[in-house]
Image: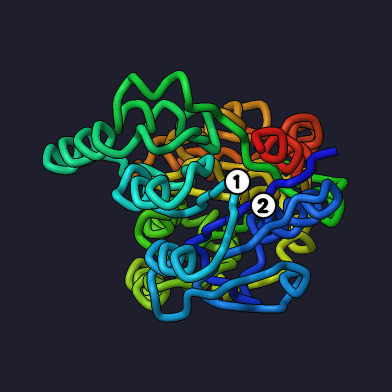
């Protein structure tokens, strides 16, 4: 039995009742796993909430303060005795990690969820990251990427000398509550998009692609978009300008996507940047194949022609060609896509792998 461990987990992740996703379920299950093994956990979030199972967590909110700065002040003002500090959605290789080590000999583990831009970083940014790696990576005991792509990017960003302390732990999803589609339309299929509505998610490319479809398909095809974000109004205006408004249904955010994927035949995710998509895993777990782009860790889970289709990011012509062929039944996925998620990407497996490192 694990004893005498006390962990601080820092998450730059706002807790929103209307947005409950895979990471929320991971936090809840990881906390429960720790409690079962007598490991005490303090969770540092920007805000406090009791929705879902957050009422079971010991949450310390930073409120208006930056989570990292708040944590440093908290440690100075309180007797913390942490054995581990784990960070999610926190920038890597900054002075923050040096400051933690000055306070105690705690083991620091960082999890990198951050996608990289499709065109890469500017030269200035590349140099900045290399310098930060040289100065501050020594204070981090373990780097975790959520995909092999992310591991590669960590080493690329900060230096080859990090290879010995950088590993991949794949994200996983809670599959038990995901309703499964038992049939699939091979002609005139239905489509779902589940995405935050910002430019990097590429929904504007999907709208362009649909506008290029033959008129016979445009008169019928429907695509439901679940999600919200700063680009929503612009996307709705784009559908009007491209005369495809009737083809898209903007459904807003939904907290029960696990019950909705199964109502569709395919998911479309035309993203420009991705580490390892939980939406893709959830869609596959519902036995709904995915049409997505060749970025980030997407090709580590989607095999073209097997459990989905891969297109080039920002290539609306290639995307419309895939959608056209899928809609006409010229391309189709026949296999049960849930099996891969059950075998390799379950939430329980993710929790066990993260628990092993402490």
Q: Secondary structure at mark 2?
A: strand
Q: Answer yes or no: do the residues labelled 1 and 2 have beta carbons within 8 Å?
A: yes
Name the quadrant of the N terminus.
top right
Q: Residue at x 46, y 39 (%)?
A: 293
Residue 314 placement: quadrant: top left
Task: Tell me the number on the disc at residue 340.
Answer: none
Q: Is residue 324 above or below residue 67?
A: above
| Image spot of residue 226 (x, y percent) | 59, 67
For marks 1 and 2 on the same chain, the one whose residue lies earlier in the sequence: 2
| Image spot of residue 128 (x, y percent) | 18, 41
Q: Is residue 203 above or below residue 119?
A: below
Q: Residue furthest left?
A: 124
Name the quadrant of the C terminus.
top right
Say whether residue 212 is visible. no
Q: Quick check: 281 left or right of 185?
A: left
Q: Residue furthest front?
A: 79
Q: Is residue 161 above or below residue 81?
A: above
Q: How is the image coloured?
A: rainbow
The residue pinned by badge 2 equals: 6
Circle 1 residues within 10 Å: few <14, some 14–19, many ≥20: some
Q: Residue at x 63, y 56 (%)?
A: 23
| Image spot of residue 89 (x, y percent) | 47, 54
Q: Secondary structure at mark 1?
A: loop
Cα separation, mark 1 vs mark 2, equals 5 Å
Q: Residue at x 70, y 47 (%)?
A: 5
Say whether residue 168 is visible. yes
Q: Is residue 195 above or below residue 290?
A: below
Task: Tell me the number on the disc at residue 83.
Answer: 1
Foreground: 297 or 138?
Answer: 138
Q: Quick check: 159 left or right of 349?
A: left
Circle 2 residues within 10 Å: few <14, some 14–19, many ≥20: some
Foreground: 1 or 58?
Answer: 1
């Amino acid at each position: 039995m694990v004893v005498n461990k006390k962990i601080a987990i820092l998450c730059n992740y706002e807790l929103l009742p209307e947005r409950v996703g895979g990471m929320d379920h991971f936090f809840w299950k990881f906390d429960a796993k720790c409690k079962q093994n007598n490991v005490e956990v303090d969770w540092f979030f920007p805000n406090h909430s009791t929705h879902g199972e957050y009422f079971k967590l010991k949450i310390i909110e930073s409120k208006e303060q930056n989570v990292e700065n708040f944590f440093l002040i908290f440690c100075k003002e309180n007797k913390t005795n942490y054995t581990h500090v784990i960070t999610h959605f926190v920038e890597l290789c900054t002075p923050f990690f040096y400051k933690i080590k000055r306070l105690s000999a705690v083991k620091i583990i960082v999890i990198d969820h951050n996608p990289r831009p499709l065109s890469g970083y500017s030269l200035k940014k590349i140099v900045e990251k290399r310098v930060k790696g040289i100065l501050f990576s020594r204070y981090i005991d373990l780097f975790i990427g959520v995909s092999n792509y992310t591991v590669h990017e960590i080493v690329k960003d900060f230096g080859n000398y990090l290879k010995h302390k950088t590993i991949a732990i794949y994200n996983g999803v809670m599959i038990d509550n995901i309703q499964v589609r038992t049939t699939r339309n091979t002609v005139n299929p239905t489509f779902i998009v589940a995405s935050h509505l910002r430019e990097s998610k590429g929904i504007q490319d999907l709208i362009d692609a649909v506008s290029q479809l033959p008129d016979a398909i445009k008169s019928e095809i429907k695509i439901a978009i679940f999600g919200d974000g700063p680009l929503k109004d612009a996307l709705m205006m784009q559908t009007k300008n491209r005369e495809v408004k009737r083809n898209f249904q903007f459904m807003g955010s939904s907290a029960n996507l696990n019950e909705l994927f199964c109502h569709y035949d395919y998911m479309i995710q035309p993203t420009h940047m991705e580490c390892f998509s939980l939406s893709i895993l959830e869609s596959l777990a519902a036995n709904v194949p995915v049409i997505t782009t060749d970025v980030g860790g997407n090709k580590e889970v989607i095999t073209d022609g097997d459990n989905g289709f891969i297109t080039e990011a920002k290539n609306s012509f290639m995307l419309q060609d895939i959608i056209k062929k899928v809609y006409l039944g010229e391309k189709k996925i026949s296999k049960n896509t849930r099996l891969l998620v059950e075998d390799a990407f379950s939430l329980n497996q993710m929790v066990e792998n993260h628990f092993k490192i402490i």
